Amino acid sequence: MEAMVCAAIAPLMIAPRADCERADEALYGMRVEILEEAGEWVRVRTHYRYEGWTQRASLGEADPAFDSAKKRVILKPFADLMAEPKVQSYPLISLTRGAVVGDGGQEAEGGWVSVRLCDGRTAWTRGTYVGEYIETHDLGREEALRRALVDSAMAYLGTQYRWGGKTPLGIDCSGLCSMAYLLNGIIIHRDASIKPEFCMHKIAYRDIKMGDLMFFPGHVAMYIENGRFIHSTSHPGDEGVVLASLNPEDPDFRGDLLEKMRECGSVFG
């Protein structure tokens, strides 16, 4: 049975209770498959093939008006979706980057656009706060896509580290990389490893290019260029989404990671 995430963030836990490890976060407007039920908790599988337990109250059914609408994605770190197209109105819901809404098909003075919520209501936000919901990718546009992947990851700079997180409220290493890819229509494995059932394949470090990934024990980072990379780290004194380098001449050199690198991955070539 399918359901729709109707909460801004639906934490996916490793067990059917709140006081345990967070495995992932499903975001507003995402579809999930219900696999198992245990009281107020349900085990779900996301469209990117990740599983976890979430509270039933975080899920609902999509209104036909939402289902039929062209989809848009929230790009602003946080966005209040207002009852009317003016700042003096009140938010019907507040969402984070990656949330999926429907295109409401209306515009108003001041750069406001309407969006459709999961329950069918119309809300308003700034047109610059939402963008194209990309479901497919074109590897033929390699250079542009590589740049878009890095730009998407860079949008999270400064975000705190959160185990299992993948929003500007908090994000972990694989959450950062998988969200950067997901926002560009590419589904990769949610964890810090390469799985054969996904489109990423192993490459040598000497062949790495912008947007490719580097894997370490329990960690993953996105390569930029000239040895520089972006990652979300819990490293003491350097927590959160930061830039670092594998070049010994740079002040933010991470020699510990260079020594531990296991493999690199790419969806290109």
Image (tube, grey):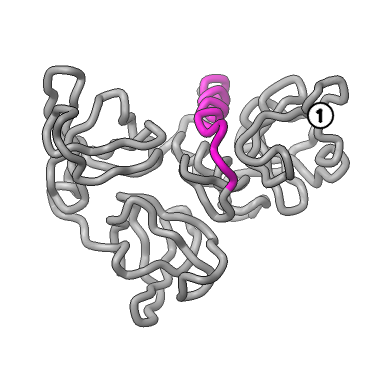
At which x and y percent is residue 127? 25, 25
The magenta segment: 142-161
- Whether residue 117 is visible, yes or no, is yes
- Lateral position of residue 158 relative to residue 249, left or right: left
Q: Amino acid at mark 1?
A: Phe
Q: Residue furthest top?
A: 110
Residue 133's place in the image compared with 196, above or below, is above
Examine the image and state in which quarter residue 228 appears. top right
**Mark 1 burial class by Cα count in 10 Å: few <14, some 14-19, many 20+:** some
- Whether residue 140 is visible, yes or no, is no
At which x and y percent is residue 64? 14, 52
Residue 219's place in the image compared with 213, above or below, is below
Examine the image and state in which quarter residue 230 appears. top right
Residue plotted at (18% across, 34% down): 124
Residue plotted at (45% across, 69% down): 53
14 and 150: which one is in front? 14
Residue plotted at (50% across, 47% down): 166
Q: Quadrant of the N terminus?
A: bottom left
- Lateral position of residue 134 relative to residue 141, left or right: left
Q: Which residue is label 1 attached to?
A: 253
Magenta region includes residue 176: no
Residue 96's place in the image compared with 249, above or below, is below
